[in-house]
Amino acid sequence: MLIINGVLHTMDGPVIECGFVHVEGDKITAVGPMSALPGGIDGPVVDAAGRHVYPGLVDAHCHLGLFGNAVGFESDDGNESTDPCTPHLRAIDAVNALDRCFEDARAGGVTCVLTGPGSANPIAGQFAALKTDGRWVDQMIVSAPVSMKFALGENPKTVYNDRKETPVTRMATAAIIRENLAKALEYMDKQNKADEDPDTDMPDFDAKLEALVPVLKGELPVHCHAHRADDIATAVRIAKEFGLHLVVVHGTEAYLISDLLAQEDIPVITGPCLTDRCKPELAGQSQENPVLLSRAGVKVAICTDHPETPIQYLPVCAAMAVRAGMDEEEALAAITINPAVIAGIADRVGSLTPGKDADIVLSTGHPLDWKSKVEQVYIGGVQVV
């Protein structure tokens, strides 16, 4: 397939005002201005004259497929709120690939999402990076697990206070995380000693601790739900104590400590922004949050937290950042290449780059113009819209 004459937002270089994208199979093979189009290319041609062409959008944090659309409890599989520590839970075991919101995602140009368990538990479980087209979740996986979900602040407090169980304070929430990380360190140490000494027995298998081992090795990032600045500080504190690879999720008050986060080189996934201040820890909500973070040098992604904000409104969330002062291409990066980099999947998605998956969107105008309409969407070179 050859897409020609489009305004290309490559996300790995400047905008190409009139360019082409060549696709072979499920990969992008060439991108450039029309003046550099090589001859002799075979295959169907898509004339994108007057259209904008950009990589499929990436939502860095949502719960797509885990909270069923218009179903209620029967399809509410995002929180195992019977145990505050559940690192062994896997998103892929709960995702309903046939939930209609996957169709909504594709219609909005969202071709890849990080989805997983919610924020009821201090340690909630394993997120997965999925393409948004498919009937069988195993065939949609880009990376699984892609991160481990932690949560601080109001959500665990509220859930377990209602149950009259621990944790009901921020101290207890942090203590549960520390306790289980310490147990996993001890478990890992016993495994290492058994590997080195044939006379030493392996520790009894523990699914929870086994799931935390790659977190402690730095192989699996921690995506930590934290809204208030003090909760963000706690996340950073724990990450330093255990050498974790930390990403802050939501970060509602992150702009208040943007310089500190920049010094620590900690990315922030901001959002959702299209919500009200529905609970106390959202009191400091500001549309300028991603703008101020980016200006401070923090790598920023923007998310919907679907279903908090419906997945198809991801570009609207980025457009809100533009209205607050962010450059258009920078805001587009926050829903394409930045989340891909933060998630460790930028070798597959996030930009129109030769060798990457042919996840491509064509729209009638700039992707962040609310009047633009998504006309065509390709995932792995196959048209899905």
Image: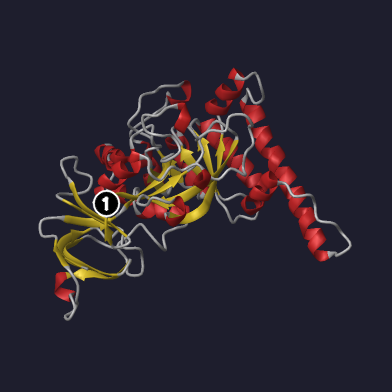
For the N terminus, the image quarter is bottom left
* Circle 1: residue type: Glu
Compared with 235, 203 (above or below) is below
Q: Can residue 180 be seen in this snapshot? A: yes
Residue plotted at (70% across, 40% down): 180
Q: Nearer the viewer, residue 246 or 229?
A: 246
Q: Among all residues in the image, which is located at the extreme right?
A: 199
Q: Residue at x 47, y 40 (%)?
A: 249
Q: Residue at x 43, y 26 (%)?
A: 282
- Where residue 155 sits: x, y (%)? 53, 27
- What x and y, as percent, mark residue 227? 48, 32
Residue 339 place in picture, x, y as percent = 40, 51
On screen, residue 158 above or below 145: above
Is 148 displayed left or right of 71 in the figure? right
Q: Position of residue 94 (x, y in %)?
A: 50, 41
Q: Seen in the image, is 22 located left or right of residue 291?
A: left
Q: Is residue 243 visible?
A: no
Instruction: Give the residue at the far bottom of this rendering.
Output: 40
Please give the residue where the numbered disc 1 appears in the rendered image: 329
In this image, 135 relative to 127: left or right? left
Callout 1 secondary element: helix
Above-or-below relation of 373 to 170: below
Residue at image point 61% right, 27% down: 170
In the depicted view, which residue is nearer to us: 370 or 385? 385
